[in-house]
Amino acid sequence: MTKLLIIDDEPGIRKTLAAILEDEGYQVLTAEDAVIALDILRREPVAALFLDVLLPNMGGIEALERIRGEWPEVEVIVMSGHANVNMAVRAVKLGAFDFLEKPLSLDKVLTSCRNALTVRRLREENRNLKQNAPSKDELIGSSEAIQRIRERIIQAAASDARLLITGENGTGKELAARAVHRHSRRAGRAFVEVNCAAIPDALLESELFGHEKGAFTDAVTCRRGRFELASGGTLFLDEIGDMSLSAQAKVLRVIQEQRIERVGGEKTIETDVRIVAATNKDLEQECDRGRFRRDLYFRLNVIPINLPSLRERKEDIPVLLLYFLKERDAGNIVLAEEAAQFLTAYSWPGNVRELKNLAERILVMYNGDRIGLETVRDLLQEKPGFSEKKSGISFPGEVKNSGPNTIFNLNYTEAKAAFEKQYLEFQLAGHDRSVARTAEAIGIYPSNLHAKLKKYHIRTER
Ligand SMILES: Nc1ncnc2c1ncn2[C@@H]1O[C@H](COP(=O)(O)OP(=O)(O)OP(=O)(O)O)[C@@H](O)[C@H]1O
Ligand SMILES: [Mg+2]
């Protein structure tokens, strides 16, 4: 239920306004001054609030500034008597959504409230769309296997059923999970990821379900859990096979009851999330070994999607490599036939991620347009430390002075160019691929940076 907060020192106004809004189906909280209101905001996920400008203790304007700073997603509707209209105008300039003149008109209250909530929802949708939108997270590949996966993703997206995505490391499980979300009716809402393997067991419960202030020693403020944050959207439970049995029991209960309780909290909160889980483990086998709850496995595995390894769809290897190269380099790159054969014969234990890393290495170390057997063989066999990395180029580790393919074996001009290219790639990746920000950070003019990026065929957009 949408939560609203009324801040007014007149009990009469609090009471009437609350009654009007409750009649409309909102849950209404009230505070007689701003100090109490800020305390409520720390605890409760308030969507919009009504704020009187003339308040004891802390004035409405100061309160507004604090709220804008700390809870920018909360819409504020300011209320003032006729004498203080100029203050209300100032409040709107400071970011209040609207102002209402007292005595309040029922109609205006409701219209303003509805508008504020609509704007808030649109803004949230917009933000989520921006986060999840880029079509670059489509699964690339022309093999029959990957085509089937793409179809399955679309089918799965049409329902709200839970999904279990399995596959070896780097096969695109996360990408598939995001694609399901993006194609689903939940696309405008949040996609919230939890890496179950990365969160210590002791913290997992509070991470998933949130906690109330004081629930445990470190719980100085109350916090919403990932289930709550994913409300209306998709919750991606990654590496679910690594979740402890006790955490599994709790997740199972939430799935069964469709509601959660924050750690240390009394009340229950309804949840509306779609759960997509992923693992590289064989959960069937984990169940046999008593390491995974079979009942949870059944609950999660409503729609199974198994991502094939790259070995099982070899024709995708050159396709993907060229895709990754062209995604970043605007030049006209071709892959020599022998190079393609060599890559196809390789076993790709790290699957698509390993292939993507090879593409990065080619982009950094190699300046030509035709990628031959030598290049791919050397770069693949060299296996630098960063091939395990999920993203980004680990720059310092790159500069090695041994091995056949380091810049130390090039002539001065080539070495300088290789270094410059690698450096710019690294910096750009570290600044969200923004030319302006990268230029500022490394201390050169944006026009100069543009020219260099063009020279090395480095793409800037994400
Ligand atoms: N079919 C594909 N098309 C384009 N990019 C892909 C494809 N499959 C995977 N990738 C890319 O490969 C990398 C690894 O993919 P992802 O993180 O989704 O794999 P994963 O199965 O979750 O791996 P892990 O088991 O290691 O967590 C990502 O950068 C992803 O964008
Ligand atoms: Mg993953």
Image (cartoon, rainbow, N blue to C red):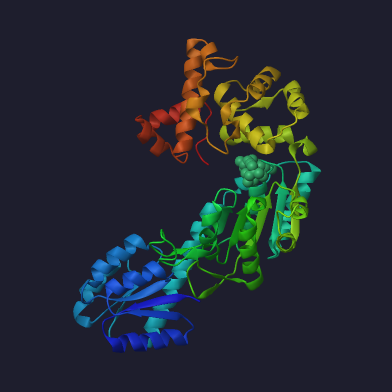
Disc tally is 0
Give residue 86's position: percent from left, percent from top.
21, 73
Is 125 on the left-hand or right-hand side of 64? right
Give residue 107's position: percent from left, percent from top.
39, 85
| Along the line of sight, the residue nearer the viewer: 304 or 83 | 304
- Compared with 426, 200 (above or below) is below
Is 417 on the left-hand or right-hand side of 238? left
Tell me which residue sits at (39%, 63%) in the image: 221
Most distant residue in the top direction: 411
Give residue 323's position: percent from left, percent from top.
65, 36
Asked where in the image residue 213 lies, by quadrant, the reply is bottom left
- Compared with 10, 185 (above or below) is above
Q: From where the camera sits, is residue 103 visible? A: no
- Compared with 411, 82 (above or below) is below
Is 312 on the left-hand or right-hand side of 265? right
Quarter, ligand 1: top right
Most distant residue in the left direction: 83
Tell me which residue sits at (29%, 64%) in the image: 66
Q: From where the camera sits, is residue 73 visible? A: yes
Tell me which residue sits at (68%, 35%) in the image: 350
